């Protein structure tokens, strides 16, 4: 909890620093400027937080977000939705249509309506240009620096610079806790806009109200446990009062909360079992097993939690029980394949994962596991093929680059082995090792096109190597 308080202090200090240096503009920055800022902002966020890139989790959140957007007027940005793997209550919208929600807040939800309510609120901040209204169209600092400042406002990123750290220790910073990213007016407007489009999308406004009440209840535990959401989204009590009044006036026309309950519980169970704290996940899934011993989704979640707590064999037993009731579920099959892989049962893993891939060929995590399983069995070309397919769907993946390099080396193609290992180390910013491997490509490769590509990479890597060594 001390870490949360520390992050709150840093958030407040950075926001104060931002406003002392750059007064609020008379008008918002342009759409193009916000798009550019959004790109830099994403680099900053990715550098400090782990995203959950599980296709099922990511696609589910994106689907709910797009369902709301479908009932809104044309928007200035394409929206992107991300789940941050962090056990805190937080959600926020960054510049350029980037919307984030933390896994801890999702785990506290009981209905899809609550997830939709949070997303509708954050989408409305973007649509109302609240973020751009806070940022001066200025040439005083570059985009990367501005992105870091904005990230500090929304995320309270630790280690945000000596100036920010110094301010957190001063009484001046402590007095700035009211100077948050959004004003009360911004929050109320985002709720007003959000609830209209939320209900047009077929959701109960009750979801937005109930999740705010949960956040408020957590706030009551004490100052060391104030949710990050409260600090970046002020006026919780006023918002609850407004939504309560709005709900009472529109109750006859609203849908009942709890739409798509089965699909949401599948989503939430996976979030807790696969991405929550491993020990807490096991306790929660064990409690769920006592309450719903015949539910295949609970068996599935309990199996995942057992495997994460170094008990893959027993975990596989519960996953198989889930499959008895849902034999054609590609997600359960994928998880069984992953557990078999974790337990060293590579042949079983390969067969199960192939079945999952047949049902859902675009799942990049299944392709990654297929690649790893095939390589573990010595089927190097097949493993490389799966990893190549994965990257065509997902984009260049650091993990895949490493195992492709290893597999090409085992195949005896040292030019390709060094090429992929060079790219792996370059992405990890280990420029010394990247430089070594790219130099080896020139020595071993017989492909002129590959050599020409590597020569260009070497120019960049050499500069970065010298810069980091100095």
Image (tube, helix red, strand yellow):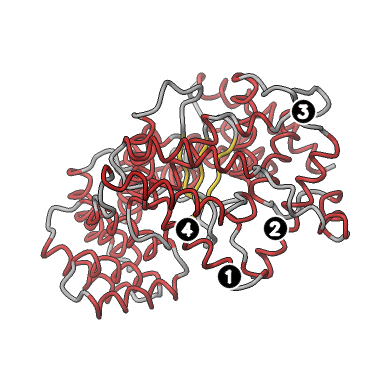
Q: Which residue is mark 1?
A: 220
Q: Which residue is mark 2?
A: 8
Counting other residues with Cα less than 10 Å from the Cα at mark 4, is it few (<14), some (14-19), or many (20 or more)?
many
The residue at 59%/25% (across/down) is 35
- Using the image as rendered, state which of residue 190 and residue 274 is in the foreground: 190
Q: CA distance from mark 4 to mark 2?
A: 17 Å
Picture coordinates of residue 345, whole percent (x, y):
27, 65
Counting other residues with Cα less than 10 Å from the Cα at mark 3, is it few (<14), some (14-19), or many (20 or more)?
few
**Which is in the foreground here, disc 1 or disc 4?**
1
Element type where label 1 sits in the image: loop
Give the residue furthest to the front: 249
Number of marks present in the image shown: 4
- Using the image as rendered, state which of residue 291 and residue 406 is in the foreground: 291
Point out which mark residue 142 bears.
3
Element type where label 4 sits in the image: helix
On screen, 438 above or below 35? Answer: below
**Which is in the foreground here, disc 3 or disc 2?**
2
Q: CA distance from mark 2 to mark 1?
A: 16 Å
The first of marks 1 and 4 along the sequence is: 4
- Asked if disc 3 and disc 2 are in contact, CB closer than 8 Å, the reply is no
**Which is in the foreground here, disc 3 or disc 4?**
4
Q: Which residue is mark 4?
A: 105
Picture coordinates of residue 186, whole percent (x, y):
60, 39
**Which is in the foreground here, disc 2 or disc 1?**
1
The first of marks 3 and 4 along the sequence is: 4
- Quarter of the image for residue 194 reads top left
Picture coordinates of residue 75, whole percent (x, y):
46, 23
Q: CA distance from mark 1 to mark 4?
A: 16 Å
- Asked if disc 1 and disc 3 are in contact, CB closer than 8 Å, the reply is no
- Asked if disc 2 and disc 1 are in contact, CB closer than 8 Å, the reply is no
The first of marks 1 and 3 along the sequence is: 3
């Amino acid at each position: 909890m001390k870490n949360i308080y520390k992050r709150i202090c840093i958030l407040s200090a950075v926001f104060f620093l931002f406003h002392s240096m750059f007064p609020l503009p008379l008008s918002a920055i342009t759409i193009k400027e916000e798009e550019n800022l959004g790109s830099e902002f994403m680099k900053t966020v990715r550098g400090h937080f782990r995203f959950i890139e599980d296709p099922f989790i990511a696609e589910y959140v994106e689907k709910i977000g797009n369902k709301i957007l479908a009932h809104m007027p044309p928007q200035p940005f394409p929206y992107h939705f991300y789940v941050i793997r962090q056990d805190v209550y937080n959600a926020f919208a960054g510049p350029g249509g980037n919307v984030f929600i933390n896994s801890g807040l999702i785990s506290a939800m009981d209905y899809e309506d609550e997830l939709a309510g949070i997303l509708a609120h954050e989408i409305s901040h973007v649509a109302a240009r609240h973020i751009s209204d806070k940022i001066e169209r200025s040439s005083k600092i570059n985009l990367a620096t501005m992105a870091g400042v904005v990230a500090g406002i929304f995320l309270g990123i630790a280690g945000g610079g000596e100036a920010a750290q110094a301010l957190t220790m001063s009484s001046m910073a402590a007095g700035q806790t009211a100077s948050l990213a959004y004003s009360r007016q911004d929050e109320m407007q985002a709720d007003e806009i959000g609830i209209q489009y939320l209900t047009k999308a077929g959701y109960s406004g009750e979801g937005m109200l109930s999740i705010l009440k949960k956040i408020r209840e957590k706030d009551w535990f004490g100052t060391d446990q104030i949710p990050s959401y409260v600090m970046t989204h002020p006026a919780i009590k006023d918002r609850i009062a407004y939504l309560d009044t709005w709900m009472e006036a529109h109750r006859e026309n609203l849908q009942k909360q709890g739409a798509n309950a089965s699909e949401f519980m599948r989503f939430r169970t996976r979030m807790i079992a696969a991405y929550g704290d491993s020990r807490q996940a096991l306790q929660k899934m064990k409690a769920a097993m006592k309450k719903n011993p015949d539910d295949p989704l609970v068996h599935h979640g309990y199996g995942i939690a057992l495997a994460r707590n170094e008990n893959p064999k027993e975990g596989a037993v519960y996953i198989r029980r889930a499959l008895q009731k849902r034999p054609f579920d590609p997600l359960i099959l994928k998880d069984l394949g992953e557990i078999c892989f974790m337990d060293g049962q590579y042949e079983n893993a390969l067969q199960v994962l192939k079945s999952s891939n047949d049902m859902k060929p675009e799942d990049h995590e299944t392709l990654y596991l297929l690649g790893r399983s095939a390589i573990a069995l010595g089927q190097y070309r097949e493993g490389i093929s799966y990893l190549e397919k994965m990257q065509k769907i997902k984009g260049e993946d650091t993990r895949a680059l490493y195992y492709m390099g290893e597999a090409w080396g085992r195949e005896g193609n040292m030019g390709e082995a060094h090429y992929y290992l060079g790219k792996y180390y370059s992405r990890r910013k280990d420029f010394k090792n990247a430089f070594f491997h790219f130099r080896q490509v020139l020595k071993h490769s017989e492909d002129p096109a590959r050599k020409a590509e590597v020569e260009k990479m070497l120019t960049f890597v050499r500069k970065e190597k010298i810069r980091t060594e100095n």
